[in-house]
Image (cartoon, rainbow, N blue to C red):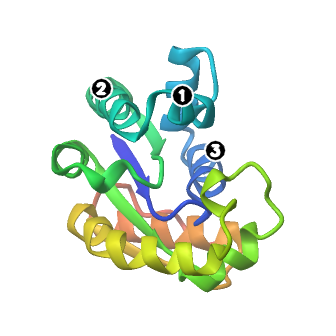
Amino acid sequence: MLLVLVGLPGSGKTTVGRQLARRLHLPFVDSDHAIEHRLGCSVREYFEREGEERFRDLESEVLDDLSLHHTGVLSTGGGSVLRPINRERLRERGHVFYLRSSPEEVYRRLRNDQNRPLLQVADPQARLRELFEKRDPLYRDCAHYVIETGRPSVSALVNMIVSQLELAGHLPMQPSAS
């Protein structure tokens, strides 16, 4: 079983993905970390040095490989849905969850994060709104399930995902804790 998390940068894909994998006793992989492992440098460095097109080529290769060979939880980079082939492969090969966060929510979470090249612009909130407008339809196109992140805790989001999987018959129903 492959569970895929998509969404804006900062929507919680890696954090939720790790906890979901732990809860379901599945392996976890973050596609950006897999790319960095393959490159031997950070995504940010490669992106700056080689440009977005070359990065997206590499990202597509890695997503193709992971979606074919990884069983477990896969957290994707925020821009992984930009190419139709990626959306198609992820949707065909896994159960895709879109962690839908508003640009304001993401900004609130990331405003002090200096490691996000995305936010190192004059108006980070405007940049996030622009990304949301462009990518929200792409995330929806790719996803089997949309999970509104809002303000729930990570464990509440994990519970929502597990419930969706149980309802769809992809997991045995868990006895409820009373």
Q: Gap between marks 2 and 3, in whole Å?
A: 26 Å
The residue lying at 26 percent from left, 74 percent from top is 137
Residue 21: percent from left, percent from top: 57, 44
- Looking at marks 2 and 3 on the same chain, the residue that comes earlier in the sequence is marked by 3
Please name the amino acid that badge 3 sits on: Arg
Q: Which mark is residue 21?
A: none
Helix, strand or loop at disc 1? helix
Please tell me whether residue 13 is drawn above or below residue 32 in the rendered image. below
Residue identified by numbered label 2: 61
The residue lying at 61 percent from left, 50 percent from top is 14
Please name the amino acid that badge 1 sits on: Arg
Quarter the N terminus occupies: top left
- Looking at marks 1 and 2 on the same chain, the residue that comes earlier in the sequence is marked by 1
Disc 1 vs disc 3: Cβ atoms closer than 8 Å? Answer: no
Helix, strand or loop at disc 2? helix
Residue identified by numbered label 1: 49
Please name the amino acid that badge 2 sits on: Glu
Residue identified by numbered label 3: 22
Q: Nearer the viewer, residue 79 or 74?
A: 79
